[in-house]
Image: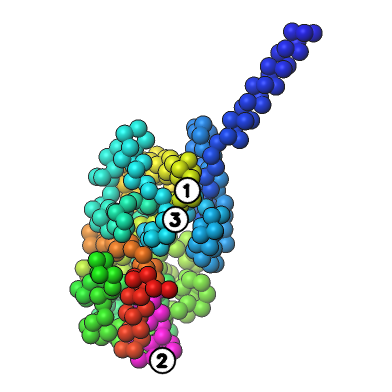
Amino acid sequence: MKKLLAVVLALVFVLSMAGFAEEGKTTVTIWHTFTKDQEAYLVKAAEDFNATSDKYTVEVLSQAYSGFTNTVKTAVKSGDGPDIIFNYASEAAEYVDLGLVADLSQYIYDDEIGIEGFDDSLAQGVMDGEVNGFSDGIIHYLPAYTTGPILYYNKTIYDELGLSVPTTWAEMEENCRVILTQKGIPGLGFDSLTDCIQMFIMEDGCGYIDVENKCVTFGTDSMKAKIQWLVDCAKEGLFQLKASADYFSTDFNSGATAAYIGSCAGYPYITPDGFEFAMAPMPAETWYPSWNRGPIVFYYDDDARAQGAYEFVKYFISAEVNIGWVQAVNALAPYSWTKALPAYEEYISGDSAAIQALNAVGAHLDIAGSLPAVTGASTVRNEIVAAVNNAAINDISVSDAWDACVENCNAALKGAE
């Protein structure tokens, strides 16, 4: 009996110590707004990571899509926010001056836990403009997948009217005028109006943000003329700037709009009512707004949490995990190590609708560019689209709307409240 009691007590001790070790792990939280299938992959990745880590436990928490970035900002400022969210470099830039994002550089280049070959792993434009583009010179974000806007169009209407897929904006305007005349509907909608305006700015050659002087450089007469053209097309009924629902897929599916520019990841939501649709590259001549979205790591004066978040990010962007993620979100891989996998080559060489959408992005990646990830960059994004809507919908003159946009952008870049 004494021997039996000793064995039982030893077993209890071992189990209690195992529980203590689990409780002693540092918890890292991820907040996200991904779809059900995407969340399932993220949860599985966290579970697999947790199973191999004796220091960290990653928890994945779904959040409401509406107002997500504002919810995160409030929570992070109060010290109760997530350790990781998935967003763009421009969103990470909003936290740099506040000191609320982690220094990932110290880990990436660490001899023991660093990422081998990191400097050669991404396209130079992404590495320079986004990853190393923060005002403090420190890495706070890493891309996890690449997507971009493409053209969804009503192939039935295009075939009936003898229209070719437009490769320039002049051709797009002409197609839309024919569609409006013959069908009485707008020829084009914009899910990604902000990105199209940014493209017009970059193709104009006036520049975007002067990082050193903290001001925008697009308050030019030539840009006002481009914005005037965009507004005139909207007022004529050629372009539709706002969707009737959250995304233009609703208007497109119902036949209320003949085409729209939206994310390549949106193809599963195209369910056309009585017509055939197709996908193609959007018109882009010298600059293309590809999207590189990935984990932003916040900092709460807790080095263990910050390192734990980095360790998960490192795991998540590794080739074997990253390839599953880009497939889950219907995206292209940003990293050379993922692209080198035979399974990735097989993935992108398919003939599914998903791959057709990705090929429409890939057609422009040779002219893809990035924009400065500085404090105020997300405000600049919001202001340029607000200016167009003010001129097209609220009937403010383009000159006044654009001047106000430039003033508001400069104030944000200089840190004015």
Viewer-side residue, 260 vs 162? 260
Q: Residues within 10 Å of mark 2 (few under 14, many from 20)?
A: few
Tell whether position 386 is magenta: yes
Residue sitting at 33 percent across and 80 percent down?
Answer: 407
Residue 397 on image: x %, y %: 35, 91
Instruction: Place residue 368 in its image quadrant.
Output: bottom left
Q: Would you name the residue on which mark 1 appears?
A: 301
Q: Which residues are magenta?
A: 382-398
Q: Nearer the viewer, mark 3 or mark 2?
A: 3
Q: Would you name the residue on which mark 3 appears?
A: 100
CB-based contact (under 8 Å), mark 3 and mark 2: no
Identified by mark 3, the residue type is Leu
Residue 57 on image: x %, y %: 54, 39
Q: How is the image coloured?
A: rainbow
Identified by mark 2, the residue type is Asp
Residue 379 versus residue 362 in the image, above or below: below
Q: Label 3 to label 2, Cα distance in Å?
A: 40 Å
Q: Would you name the residue on which mark 2 appears?
A: 395
- Secondary structure of the residue carrying tag 2 is loop
